Image: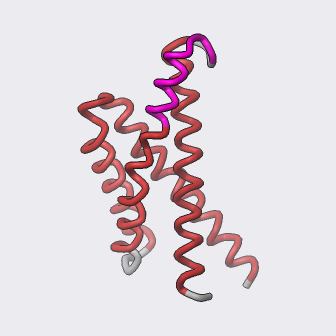
């Protein structure tokens, strides 16, 4: 498989993980702040802005994959987990608190690893 095709798959996977993470955080914030999804425009808009702020993690996640690709799978998942959580805490802790900082990092890591595992499983079935 050409290298640029693998890179595009990785970037597409990272974007899907970010979109899913944003959706989950938006739903969580909507329920947390208002008890319902569409209680007020201010809550809805601020929840939307907070949920998409996870885009900050996207370039760091790509760099983490790039720098850990030569590690074993288990070590790669372990290092990736701590780096995603660490970057999330560094960027989101002051603005959003512990709960949201951990939610951003953990959800992004979990969705990224899950999509990567699914992608590798499908690739193994094709071969």
Q: Position of residue 19 (x, y in %)?
A: 57, 47
Between 111 and 71, the one lying in front of the other is 111
Task: Please name whichever residue, 96 or 123, is drawn nearer the observer in this view of the structure.
Answer: 96
Can you name the residue that lies furthest to the right here? 126
Q: Residue at x 37, y 76 (%)?
A: 71
Q: Is residue 12 positioned above or below 109 on the image?
A: below
Residue drawn at x 28%, y 43% as measured from the top left: 91
> 89 and 81: which one is in front?
89
Whole-percent x, y for residue 84 in the image: 36, 53
Image quarter in which the C terminus is found: bottom right
Chief secondary structure of the magenta span?
helix
Display coloring: secondary structure
The answer to if 41 sits in the magenta stretch is yes
Residue 74, picture quadrant = bottom left
The range drawn in magenta is 38-51
Where residue 121 sits in the image (x, y, percent)? 66, 70
Quarter of image, res 58: bottom left
Q: Is residue 49 above or below residue 107?
A: above
Q: Does residue 116 lie above or below 101 as drawn?
A: below
Q: Position of residue 3 (x, y in %)?
A: 53, 85
Which residue is drawn at the image coordinates 57% and 62% (left, top)?
Answer: 13
- Residue appearing at x 27%, y 35% in the figure: 93
Is residue 37 highlighted in magenta?
A: no
């Amino acid at each position: 498989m050409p290298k640029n095709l693998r890179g595009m798959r990785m970037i597409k996977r990272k974007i899907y993980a970010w979109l899913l993470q944003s959706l989950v955080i938006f739903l969580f914030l909507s329920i947390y702040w208002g008890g319902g999804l569409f209680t007020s425009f201010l809550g809805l808009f601020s929840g939307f802005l907070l949920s998409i702020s996870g885009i900050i993690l996207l370039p760091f996640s790509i760099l983490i994959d790039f720098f850990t690709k030569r590690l074993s799978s288990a070590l790669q998942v372990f290092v990736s987990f701590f780096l995603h959580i660490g970057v999330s805490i560094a960027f989101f802790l002051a603005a959003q608190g512990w709960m949201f900082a951990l939610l951003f990092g953990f959800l992004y890591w979990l969705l990224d690893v899950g999509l990567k595992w699914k992608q590798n499983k499908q690739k193994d079935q094709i071969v």
